[in-house]
Structures are given as C-alpha cells and as structure tokens.
Image (cartoon, helix red, strand yellow):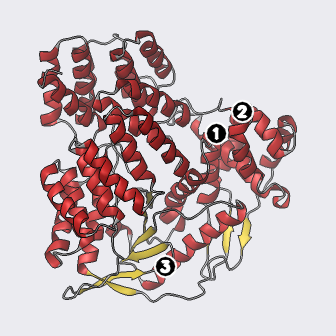
Amino acid sequence: MTMTVAMLAVGLGCVTAVATQPASAQHPGVKQSRDWKALPGTGLDVVGNAREGDLRRARREITAFRAALASLMPGIRLSAPEPTTLVVFKDHPSFTEFAPRDGKHRRQLNVGGYFSKSADRNYLVLPVHANRRTTSETALHEYTHFVISRNFRDVPLWLNEGLAEFYSTFEVNDQGHAIVGKAPSSRIDTLRSDRMPPLRHLLSGATIPRNFRSSDTAMFYAQSWLFVHYMTLADGGKRQGQIVKYLQLLPTTTSAEAAAREAFGTTLEALEHDVIRYSERDQFPALGLAGAASEAQPQETAAMNEADVAELKGRLLVELGVAREAAPYVERALALDPSHRAGQITQGRLLVLEERETEALAILVKVAQEDPGSFAAQYYLGSALYNGGRYQDAIVALDRALKISPKAASAWFAVALATMALRQYDQSDSAMAQVQELYSAADWHYARAHEALRLGRYDAALPEATTFIERAGVGDDSAPYAAFIGVIAARRLGLVERAEALLTRTASVLLPRSWPLTVVQFMQGRLNATEFLRKAQDNGQRTEANTYLGMHLAQIGQNDEAIKHLTWVKEKGERHYTEYALAIAELKRLQSGQ
C-alpha cells in the first residue's frame, strides 16, 4: 500500500511541511524572484508564480468559502493551531511537477488541486485554470473534510462525504458574491437513473459501498449529497444548523435514528418522504452570499526571494515523498542562503526521508539548539529521534514542542507512538485521546496500527487496526490493509479465530480478481507462495507480496526463507510503500535473533 498526501503520518519520516519564517522573509544578499510573489494575511498566506490578480482572486475564493462554512454551520471552528498557505501556480504545466502522486508514484495529471495537512502548516495547492471546477473542486472537497474533522468526532461517512460534495461546488465572482450548494449534474443524473436506498439505511451506514470502486459508490455519494443539500437549503433553509445538532447528539444517543429524530424534529419516514419529493424537482436552490470575500485592508504583494522559493518547492516535494526531486531545490535554497532556517529543517527532513538519520540528526539538533522557541525545530528533531529508535530522547524533544504549541495534534501523535514503542501504553492512549480531541480522523488509527506492527507491539496493532476499519468503513481503500495488519498481529498473539474472522469479513467486500483479494486468499491458505508471487503484476504488488510472505514464513519458523523475501524488499522493493517499513523491521528482528 502506498503512502499518500491524504494519509496522516504513516511513519514520522513522512510527516509533512514546516515553515519557521514567513515565505516572503527578506534575506540580505539573496536576489528577489522575478515571478514568485507573496500575499500575507491573517491565518492564510498566499504565494505563487501566478499574476497578482490571480493570487488575490484565489484568496478571495478561500476567504469566501470559509465565510460560507461559518454562515451555514454556526459555531464551527475554522481556525487551527497551524496556519494555512495557499500556493497558486500560474498554469497547469507549472503545477505538474508538484502534483500529488498515485500508487505507483506517478504524477496525477488529472488532479485540479489538493489540500495537504501537516504538522505545523497546511497547504492548498492549485493551478490557475480557465475552468474553476477543474481548478479547485478537489481542494475544496478535501478542505471541507479537514474542517469537519477539526470540529467533530466520529462523523458518519455519508455525512462527511455529503458535506464535502455540497461545498465543493462553491463559486465566487470578482465582486465577492458567492454561490454555495450548486447541484452537481453528475449526482442528479445518478439520482434519476436508479432508486435510492431507504434513508434509515444511509443514516445507519448500511449503504456504505462494499468497495469505493464498486457500482453502488455513485449512489452513495449522490444520496449523501442530496440529504445534506435538503437539510441545508430546502424550504428556505429552515433546517440550517440541524446537521450540527445531529453531529453533537451522535455520541450521546443510543442510535443514529434516535439522534436524527431529536435533531431533525420528525420521524425518519416523514423525512424520507420529503427528501424523495425534493429529489424530483427540476431545479435545486443555491445560496448566495454577498460581500463574503471583502478585504477591509488589502495587503500589498511582495516579491519572494529565490531562497524562499527554492525551499518552498523542496518542501512541497518532501511532503509528496519524492526525495530525489526535492533535493536540488533544498540544495539551492541553502546555497543561496546557508542560514535559511526553514531550508535547514527541510534538509533534515529530506535526509530522514533518504534514511540518512545520522546526518539528519546532526542538522536538526543544531537547529533546535539555536532556535529553542521554534515548534518546527523541536518537533522535527523529535521525529528524527523517533525514526532512529531513540524514543525517550524523542519524547523530551516533543515535550518541548508541545510547550510551544499545546494543540499540535501531530506532536501528540508522535508522543503516542514513542510511548507505545516504550510499552508505556497508558501514556500512549492518553496522548492518542488528545490527538482525537484536537483533530478527529480515522487515519490516525491506521498510522498507529502500522507503527505498532512495525515495532512488534502486536497487542496495540490489533485494536488500532480494528478501530480504523470501524471508523473508516469496510469500503475504504485502506481497510483491507488495516485488516492485514490486524491479521498478522492476531496470529502472533495466538488469536487464530480473530484473524480468520478478519479475513472472512475483508474478503466479503472486495472485488473479484482485485489485488487485495489475492492477498486475502494467500493469508487464508488458498494460494501457495509460488501462486501468490506469480499474481503480482508490478513492483508495488511484488513489494507487498514478498513482505506478507516473509512475515508469514517468520511466523511459522522458516526464518531463512523469510529473510530471502524480506531482503528482496530491502534491495528491490518500492520504498514509498508502507510494507517496505514493515519488511525492514521484520528483517532486523530476524537477523538479530529476536
């Protein structure tokens, strides 16, 4: 399975982004960029090589989008401990180098933008495009998920996706007039082409797609969008605010149905009748917000210097996990300005990504000593110490980071991992609770499960993997891989029936002839090693196959054979796959005789 932008720190070496100084900071003797500019602002910095008018338009759109969220979801928190930077490229060709990668680490050229979460700064990365939908729908969809996760815990999947779909069609014109809730034609077509499942099935989770590539996915998204649209804009918006009430009631009521009845003030049968009638209308309302994006005191743009530009480009590529592409930019930033603090930290992170921990620590220790008040310096030092197996030292550095920024979810998560590594489970669980309080997301559980398995903490890996599946849903793309973690952990704990139950459940939702189903069949003993390896179609699948085969052979005591397959992963495997880290850790255990 690949590490992606959408995932949260599946290994601390891939935790993303740092900014210890403003992007437009001036450095004596470093020349200014001819095309890169910065537009500072409260909580939202805008930088890019786009024209000044495009930078202002992009910020106006995001500002208006945040205003729309605040208007339609009263009381929602839009601010976060870390600031947000909007990176605007002048066109799609200049954006392409920094586009997110797919499972084979190829650029996703059809992506019109993306939202990237990080330890101390978040990024919205967009190209300027004639078609606004192509430019920003993806980013607005992901940004909505981010805001929801910052405010509510355990949001049902239908509601999370319905809200993101509803807000992703947001538009704002040059005068600052915004439109929220435009009906996406693709969702309307789906609703008209087939019969919707009962509303109670949607609310209970019974209609979650068996797999997000299956045929029922379109209806799930369409019905989720429709219900959110109805609750937000039907009958003049009289139900606005009821979704927030529903979210608040979910943790304290006996069922989703009970929460719905209390929040929506009617029975599910009556509500379903109204929603069906609503879906049959010829036109759907949208909400207009006038003047939502006005700037009381417009800021002046400033030319960025070349060192800042190079560091930013290197950092974006480090976030994407492409060390080879990031290195020239980081080197250029430090060649232009050897004292560039953000460049030094990004260099340290790059070295961690390249598995050069000793060199990384030399840089990060120095930076942390010279800049004790920098959250980024302390946090990334703690991350590097963790990656080097110095867990107690990592906790000390992370504690310093948390004194600077007590609400930094990534730092609390790093503490949860380091204390788990030391088998301090009470402290680890306490830190994990802080993470979910600050930033509720199922991905934290996947990341913790993966690290627990890598560290050999099987008693922690199994419950975390199970929790991820329950929260993300069995149809989530990562759910089979969480199940594989749980199966390996369960077998090493002697819980054979638990492992078999996980495999049976996982197999029931996978598409025929899919690669994850092939892995399940191997783990169930329905494929032998030769057949399993032969079915791997590319190097990524071979990385997974050799890892799971090696771990299976180690489990049954065939250590020499296990070492052969794990060594193959070390020498020929895809390093950006999460299985790579599992294989390396297992290989070290076997070679050390543990």
Is there any visible trace of residue 194 in the rendered image?
A: no
Name the residue at 41% across, 72% down.
88
Residue at which label 3 appears? 41
Residue 344 to residue 142: above or below: below
Q: Secondary structure at mark 2?
A: loop
Within 10 Å of disc 3 (Cα), the crowding (few <14, some 14-19, many 20+) is some
Residue 218 lies left or right of residue 374; in this view the side is right
Question: Of label 1 and label 2, which has the lower sequence position?
Answer: 2
Q: Does the residue at mark 3 contact the one at mark 2 (Cβ under 8 Å)?
A: no
Question: Of label 3 and label 2, which has the lower sequence position?
Answer: 3
**Residue 240 placement (x, y as % from top left):** 78, 57
Residue at which label 2 appears? 197
Q: Which mark is residue 348?
A: none
Q: Which mark is residue 219?
A: 1
**Residue 559 placement (x, y as % from top left):** 15, 16
Residue 16 to residue 222: above or below: below
Residue in the foreground of this view, choosing between 157 and 507: 157
Mark 3–mark 1 distance (CA, rounded to whole Å): 40 Å
